[in-house]
Image (cartoon, rainbow, N blue to C red):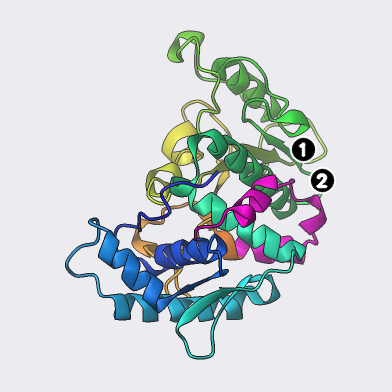
Amino acid sequence: MLDSLDTPPSGNDVFIWTDYLELRALTSADSCFSRGDLASVEGRSKDLGRGFKVESQWRAVADFAGVRLNDFGKNYPFAVSADGDTLEVHFDNEPGKRMYLGLLLAACMRNIKNSHRGVVARAFEEACFNVFEKLMPEGSTVRATWANGGPEAPYVGTLYDKMVQIARDLRCTPNFEPHDFKPSDSGDGGIDLIAWHDMSDTREGLPIAAGQVGCSREEWRSKQCEASWLAKHSRHFPLMHGWATYYFMPLDLREADGRWAYKSDIGSAIIVDRLRILRLVERYDLLSTMPNMPFIDEALAYRVI
């Protein structure tokens, strides 16, 4: 299921490089990845720029892995050796660690073969649905809009059909016509998750939230606005009150000091990244409700000698 493991990330983002080295450790015959292994990657790769320095990159990754160990705690399935030269896998199949690995693999989609990407993405979507549901007020209706999504995604038909059904649930008159959409479009229109509270009556004016789920390392900058009422959907759904927007990502979008990475690129969406997902899963005791992720076992069985 894995591919292109010899191809390192572009750029120097420490959260991306730490993911890459974690993946390499996970798939190593020795269940570890060392400073020397990173030097070998540099020697074989033609994609690293002249500014790449093994020592500084390794130290940044080792330090950030220490930050992750502190913040993810018992759910972090890696550790840096005492001498600081090796990133080691410490995995015992505990549910929290499995969840971390599921999020790590979803964040490393460029290293997942095309034949497996849909399975990984759907498992991540389902996990986010469970978290999103807990973030909504008690008594809310929570639904997904993705295709073939099972009981969580009751909206069916073309995108136009789905949008009409959503408008009906949100108690507003849709401001669009069939010809506004491609006839064959059966996508989600940018809305993966939708939730509302009925306020115990039948009038307009509901508290609503919508969410988008994405695994891309780069496209999150634009995709975070896909579910935004103000940026995209206010014309489609003329509501009395706009909705809150969430964007779920498997990336650990942080700097080493704990602040948001690329904070200037974060818009009005509420970002729910890897750390928030795992902490919310723990807070709401959701590990037993997480989707089955057999691709984790496939990754664990993959060994690069």
Residue 61: assigned label: none
Q: Secondary structure at mark 2?
A: loop
Relative horizontal placement of residue 262, taking residue 1 as reference (left or right): left
Q: Give the quarter of the figure containing the N terminus.
A: top right
Q: Which residue is mark 2?
A: 139
Farthest bottom residue in view:
83
From the viewer's side, name the closer residue of 207 and 153: 153
Q: Is residue 79 visible?
A: yes
Q: Are marks 1 and 2 in contact (CB under 8 Å)?
A: yes
* Secondary structure type for disc 1: loop
Circle 1 residue: 198
Left or right for 78, reference 268: right
**Vertical relation: 72 (above or below) 129:** below
| Residue 171 image-quadrant placement | top right
**Which of 92/282 is in front?**
92
Residue 198 image point, x, y percent: 77, 37
**Residue 122 coordinates in the image, percent (x, y):** 62, 39
Q: Which residues are magenta?
A: 276-305
Residue 50 image-quadrant placement: bottom left
Residue 32 locus on image (x, y percent)? 53, 72
Mark 1 or mark 2: which comes first in sequence? 2
Disc 1 marks a residue whose amino acid type is: Asp
On screen, residue 44 above or below 125 = below
Distance CA(mark 1)–CA(mark 2): 8 Å
Q: Quadrant of residue 159?
A: top right
Q: Is residue 219 magenta?
A: no
